[in-house]
Amino acid sequence: MNALKIRFELAKKGMRYVDVAEKCEMSGISVGAVIYRKFRSEKIMKCIAEIIGQPVEKVFPEFNEKSNKKRNPYKMAANN
């Protein structure tokens, strides 16, 4: 799912970045950065997927727990 689609799906659920951040116990900036693929946080990715009601692999196709260490297209967040 691209960033605009994720934002649309979150808006349909009445969720803003700050709401997602609160639920994930992270910052809104971090949520936005994950959505726009500026950095990676498995915790935020899973939280967003849960809110949207889709598997994390569908929301973030690059998400693959087994190969995160080998293929990391962007920085890992410190608090996964």
Image (spheres, rainbow, N blue to C red):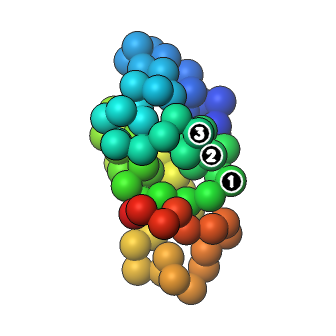
Which element is circle 1 on? loop
On the image, numbered disc 2 is attached to which residue? 33
Vertical relation: 65 (above or below) 16: below
Q: Nearer the viewer, residue 75 or 2?
A: 75
User: Which label number is shown at residue 9?
Assistant: none
Residue at image coords 42%, 20% = 15
Q: Nearer the viewer, residue 57 or 21?
A: 21
Residue at image coords 48%, 40% = 27
Q: Assess whether mark 1 and mark 2 are in contact (beta carbons under 8 angstroms).
A: yes
Vertical relation: 60 (above or below) 75: above
Q: Assess whether mark 2 and mark 3 are in contact (beta carbons under 8 angstroms).
A: yes
Residue 58 appears in the figure? no
Vertical relation: 31 (above or below) 9: below
Residue at image coords 44%, 50% = 45
On the image, numbered disc 1 is attached to which residue? 38
Q: Is residue 76 left or right of residue 53?
A: right
Of mark 2 and mark 1, the one earlier in the sequence is 2
The CA span between labels 2 and 1 is 5 Å
On the image, numbered disc 3 is attached to which residue? 29
